[in-house]
Image (spheres, rainbow, N blue to C red):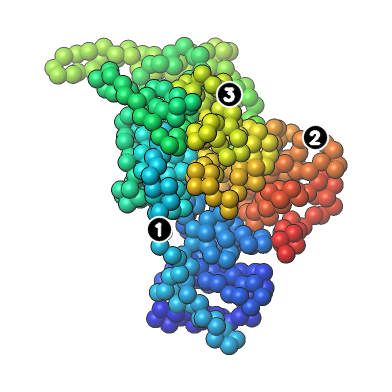
């Protein structure tokens, strides 16, 4: 029971069992989260800092409070961040014991100010302004790093939330300024020298040195005590004739998203690719409601075929078709055709070529005004090509390539709980930033990558499909629920063995069960095929393991 006063909330102790937690929604839309361990109670802001989820709807496993939406995790004892996608911890409030009740003073915050007094005479250079680079800089400052931080980015924007480009931004549901990581003044408020529109042409790991290419053709070198390389990935353009003509787009940056948003109005859009980027783009443009038509072309027979089973894939296809999306499967695009047009510029009539459609290998032609390539990405490892291969930069569990030199994000091939792999997911990039900052600060309290698991989500028509772990194929699976009603959870295995443990799972609508699975997987106790078929209770087991 809650009783709202001016700045305090009184809560009955009997509401919360030891080892548990509970959230309390207030009239002003705020949420208070209370955790309990025996007679020790603690109070926090109960909204996840990432997207505002009610943390009370999540799961508490031991000292971890896990968000039900995107699996950000917080320490139940002090609210500190344990796992992204959130980029900061929880605000903790003063709490007093009042007999059978506890009283929370929401005007009294317990979070201590950060003293940036560590490594004050050092310089950290971060190459890349994406999620991995941002998280490294952010965690360094939150961890007390007092040295100089320089971030160099080819982009013309401060670090922003790239996954939302193909979700909320293209759909017209989120403005550009809302995508900025840490807010508009993040760099200045954290004393970070953010250099935009600059290109690093070479990294010399043995010297912890970078070469910066200037607009006038000259170059300069900079050396750091700690060098973090997080150059990300570039969209892959398939060898299709006409892929370089006007009207063909890829989606990776804010600039790309703006171009697509402007160019797609009243136009016939063709999307090549049925992975989650292609599907999200189709969903976002359909929700925006500004195109003339949207057709998605896939080489395979279904969508997201390397991630989910055929049954789940068919449910996603149905969802898109109900929104007016056309699909062409088992198709190879031979050519993006062009048409010649005339345009007036400065009083002169000039000829130019523009997209006219796509021609498939079977001879079919599909009319189009713009084409969007959702055909994957490749890591930007060129500047490190002397020491690494195109499949990724080989680093240790702390993302270290050389003493004081780190490679992270989309370019890193690192060992996590699931083995050594290169993963192009936002949450993984943020994990890399946390681990790298901890390594620089020599902070042993932060888990290495080997204690973490991958997670990603895709948002289509307001429905969030979430995936935890890693499976080489979705073919060895067990499905519970009904994907057609967008209510299922599916577990994936490396083979058909009864004693094989699940290595990944995806869900629509069963978020708490996925959180529980993720915690079991993280701790090496994922259920076997036989256990799942016998009615394994995921949530109970996650609670039991954490006691």
**Taking 47 as reference, is 87 above or below it?**
above
Pick whichever of labels 3 and 1 is earlier in the sequence: 1
Q: Which mark is residue 392?
A: none
Quadrant placement of the C terminus = bottom right
- Is residue 322 in view? no
The mark that comes first in sequence, 2 or 1, is 1
The label nearer to you, 3 versus 1, is 1
Which label lies toward us, 2 or 3?
3
Q: Position of residue 162 (x, y in %)?
A: 44, 39
Element type at marker 2?
loop
Q: Residues within 10 Å of mark 1 (few under 14, many from 20)?
A: few
Mark 3, residue position: 391
- Residue sticking out furthest to the front: 121
Report the residue at 64% width, 40% height from top.
Answer: 416
- The disc placed on residue 495 is 2
Q: Nearer the viewer, residue 13 or 463?
A: 13
Q: At 47% across and 71% down in the image, what residue appears?
A: 93
**Sequence-first disc among 2 and 3:** 3
x 55%, y 62%: residue: 55
Q: Residue 203 placed where, x, y %?
A: 44, 25
Q: Is residue 508 visible?
A: yes
Mark 2 to mark 1 CA distance (whole Å): 51 Å
Query: For residue 115, which numbered disc appears in the image?
Result: 1
Q: Position of residue 48 (x, y in %)?
A: 50, 59
- Kindly report which numbered mark, 2 or 1, lies closer to the viewer in this rendering: 1
Q: Position of residue 5 (x, y in %)?
A: 43, 82
């Amino acid at each position: 029971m809650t009783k709202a006063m001016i700045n305090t909330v009184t809560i009955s102790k009997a509401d919360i069992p030891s080892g548990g937690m509970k959230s309390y929604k207030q009239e002003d839309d705020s949420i208070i989260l209370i955790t309990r361990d025996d007679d020790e109670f603690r109070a926090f802001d109960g909204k996840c800092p990432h997207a505002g989820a009610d943390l009370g709807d999540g799961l508490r496993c031991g000292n971890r409070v896990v968000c039900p939406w995107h699996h950000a995790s917080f320490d139940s004892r002090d609210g500190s961040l344990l796992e992204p996608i959130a980029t900061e911890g929880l605000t903790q409030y003063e709490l007093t014991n009042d007999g059978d009740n506890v009283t929370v003073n929401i005007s009294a915050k317990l979070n201590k100010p950060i003293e940036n007094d560590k490594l004050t005479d050092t310089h950290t250079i971060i190459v890349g302004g994406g999620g991995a680079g941002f998280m490294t800089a952010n965690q360094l400052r939150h961890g007390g790093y007092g040295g100089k931080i320089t971030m160099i980015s080819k982009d013309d924007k401060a670090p922003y939330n790239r996954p939302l480009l193909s979700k909320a931004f293209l759909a017209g549901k989120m403005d550009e300024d809302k995508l900025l990581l840490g807010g508009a003044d993040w760099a200045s408020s954290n004393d970070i020298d953010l250099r935009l529109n600059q290109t690093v042409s070479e990294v010399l790991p043995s010297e912890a040195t970078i070469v910066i290419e200037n607009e006038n053709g000259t170059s300069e070198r900079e050396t750091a005590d700690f060098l973090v390389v997080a150059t990300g990935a570039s969209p892959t353009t398939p060898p299709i004739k006409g892929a370089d003509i006007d009207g063909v787009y890829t989606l990776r940056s804010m600039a790309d998203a703006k171009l697509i948003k402007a160019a797609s109005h009243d136009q016939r859009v063709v999307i090549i690719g049925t992975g989650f980027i292609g599907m999200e783009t189709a969903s976002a443009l359909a929700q925006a409601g500004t195109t003339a038509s949207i057709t998605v072309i896939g080489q395979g027979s279904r969508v997201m075929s390397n991630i989910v089973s055929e049954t789940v894939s068919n449910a996603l296809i149905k969802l898109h078709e109900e929104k007016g999306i056309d699909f062409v499967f088992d198709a190879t695009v031979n050519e993006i055709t062009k048409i010649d047009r005339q345009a007036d510029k400065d009083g002169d009539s000039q000829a130019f070529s523009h997209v006219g459609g796509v021609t498939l290998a079977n001879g079919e032609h599909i009319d189009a005004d713009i084409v969007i390539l959702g055909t994957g990405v490749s890591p930007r490892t060129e500047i490190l090509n002397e020491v690494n291969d195109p499949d990724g930069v080989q680093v240790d569990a702390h993302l270290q390539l050389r003493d004081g030199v780190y490679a992270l994000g989309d370019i890193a091939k690192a060992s996590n709980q699931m083995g050594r792999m290169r993963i192009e997911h936002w949450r993984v990039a943020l994990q890399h930033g946390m681990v790298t900052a901890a390594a620089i600060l020599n902070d042993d309290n932060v888990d290495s990558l080997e204690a973490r698991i991958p997670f990603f989500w895709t948002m289509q028509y307001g429905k969030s499909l979430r995936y935890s772990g890693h499976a080489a194929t979705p073919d060895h699976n067990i499905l519970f629920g009904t994907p057609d009603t967008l209510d299922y959870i599916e577990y994936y295995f490396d083979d058909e063995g009864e004693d094989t443990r699940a290595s990944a799972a995806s869900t629509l609508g069963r978020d708490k069960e996925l959180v529980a699975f993720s915690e079991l997987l993280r701790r090496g106790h994922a259920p076997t095929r036989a256990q799942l078929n016998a009615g394994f209770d995921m949530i109970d087991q996650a609670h039991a393991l954490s006691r």
